[in-house]
Amino acid sequence: MSLLEVKNCTIRYQNGTSAVNNVSFSVEKGEIVSLVGESGSGKTTMVRAILGLLPPGGKVTEGEIILDGRNLLSLSEREQEELRGKDIAMIFQDVGASMDPIKLIKSQYVEAIRTHERISREESYDKATDMLKRMHLTDANRVMASYPFELSGGMKQRVGIAMGMTAQPKLLLADEPTSALDVTIQAQVVHELRELRDKYGATIILVTHNMGVASYLSDKIGVMKTSQMVEFGTRDEIIIDPKEQYTKDLIDAVPKMGGNRFAR
Ligand code: ADP
Ligand code: MG
């Protein structure tokens, strides 16, 4: 059984147009699956539906989303809330914007841990610093004693990833987690995501418009175009032997770097 199965999923917003149209794909435990496609193709809508947090007016009108054998669409509001952060966590494009600007990282982080776990502040603090170190924020105590504005964009993004991973969710959703970062920092954060999978067995769905990032990171890639998944396959099937012209165009749009743009 796959960890996640999305079956014939259609998602509509209030105006009636389908943002996601009859999309199916699955994610195995320990895999990184990327959803790639142009802006407006339905990627964010798809992952937010998995998280159970569609924007107001959005609704899954057809299909199933099954995590570990449980149909997420039949859960109560309360059950969904329990799932979020614990079984499914999400990293947003600009983590900094979702942080409280007037609270130290340590109070935000410790609070976040304690909404899911009945452990002391001290234990929560230790858990947090341990996770920050895993994300290569070596001076974890200083990070904890900082306000968000005192950290660089790349540091904040790593704090966000660390916070998402602390509860060891079954599934981590990352929506354009590097797009707001400088190119050099992007590469580092992409590397941390890869390490999460390789070292800690995380299962990740990554949303990106960048086929280069998807190629480097993914076990499988789903290509989305105008609400549909036009192609889904292993990394090599998509990158080496794409079937759709649209996929080829996305691959061609990746700037060549050192003659080997898809090195991994
Ligand atoms: P992507 O993440 O691939 O850029 P989105 O999932 O954000 O795509 O958007 C898919 C489609 O759904 C677009 O046509 C977009 O305009 C529409 N859409 C997204 N969010 C909303 C919303 N909150 N209300 C109405 N329509 C939306
Ligand atoms: Mg999006």
Image (cartoon, helix red, strand yellow):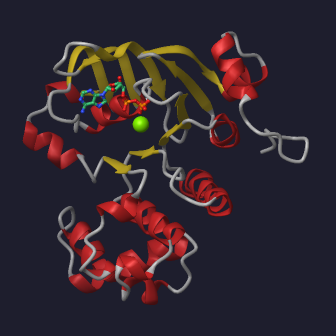
Total numbered labels = 0
Displayed-image quarter of ligand 1: top left
User: Residue at point 20% right, 70% down?
Assistant: 114
Residue placed most toward the observer, 86 or 144: 144
Location of residue 1 in the rendering, given as x and y in whole percent from the top left corner: 43, 24
Which residue is rendered at x = 49% and y = 43% of the image?
A: 204
The residue under the point 44% across, 60% down is 161
Whether 255 is drawn above or below 102: the answer is: above
Tell me if I can see residue 166 in this picture.
Answer: no
In which image quadrant can residue 7 be found? top left
Left or right: 251, with 115 as reference point: right
Quadrant for the C terminus, please.
top right
| Residue 38 in view of the camera | yes
Q: Where is residue 62 in the image (x, y as percent from the top left)?
A: 24, 12
Q: In this view, does 165 lie to the left or right of 32?
A: left
Q: Where is residue 183 in the image (x, y as percent from the top left)?
A: 66, 57
Tell me which residue sits at (16%, 20%) in the image: 14
Tell me if residue 150 comes above or below residue 238 in the rendering: below
